[in-house]
Amino acid sequence: MPTAFVLINTEIGSEEEILNELKKIPNVKEAYVVYGVYDIVAKVEADSMDKLKEVISWRIASR
């Protein structure tokens, strides 16, 4: 099963809101607020690479 770890930057103070929205996406298996260069790391899984790219591009990056 194709898996990706997506590193996300958010606006200051919106980390929890974005985290909660990410957790509603079925393909997001885990998501955490982190400290450092990025604000959130999410583990995303899908049945195929095409589906994985679709989820990341249209469900995650578009937010």
Image (cartoon, rainbow, N blue to C red):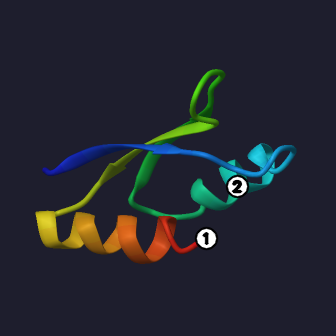
Q: Position of residue 6 (x, y in %)?
A: 41, 45
Q: Position of residue 21 (x, y in %)?
A: 67, 61
The percent coordinates of residue 27 (x first, y second) are 39, 60
Secondary structure beneath label 2:
helix
Which residue is drawn at the image coordinates 25% and 64% (left, top)? 52
Sequence-wise, the earlier of marks 1 and 2 is 2
- The residue lying toward the viewer, choosing from 59 and 26, is 59
Where is residue 17 shown, x and y percent of the image? 79, 54
Residue picked out by circle 2: 18
Based on the displayed image, in which of its 4 quarters is residue 37 positioned?
Answer: top right
Q: Nearer the viewer, residue 32 or 62?
A: 62
Q: Is residue 33 left or right of residue 4?
A: right
Residue pointed to by mark 1: 63
Answer above or below: position of 55 versus 13: below
Assess disc 1: are there few (<14), some (14-19) or many (≥20) residues with their C-alpha within 10 Å of its C-alpha.
Answer: few
Q: Amino acid at mark 1?
A: Arg
Residues at discs 1 and 2 in contact (Cβ within 8 Å): yes
54 vs 56: above or below: below
Report if residue 48 is visible in the image: no
Q: Quadrant of the C terminus?
A: bottom right
Image point (49%, 66%), residue name: 61
Q: Amino acid at mark 2?
A: Ile
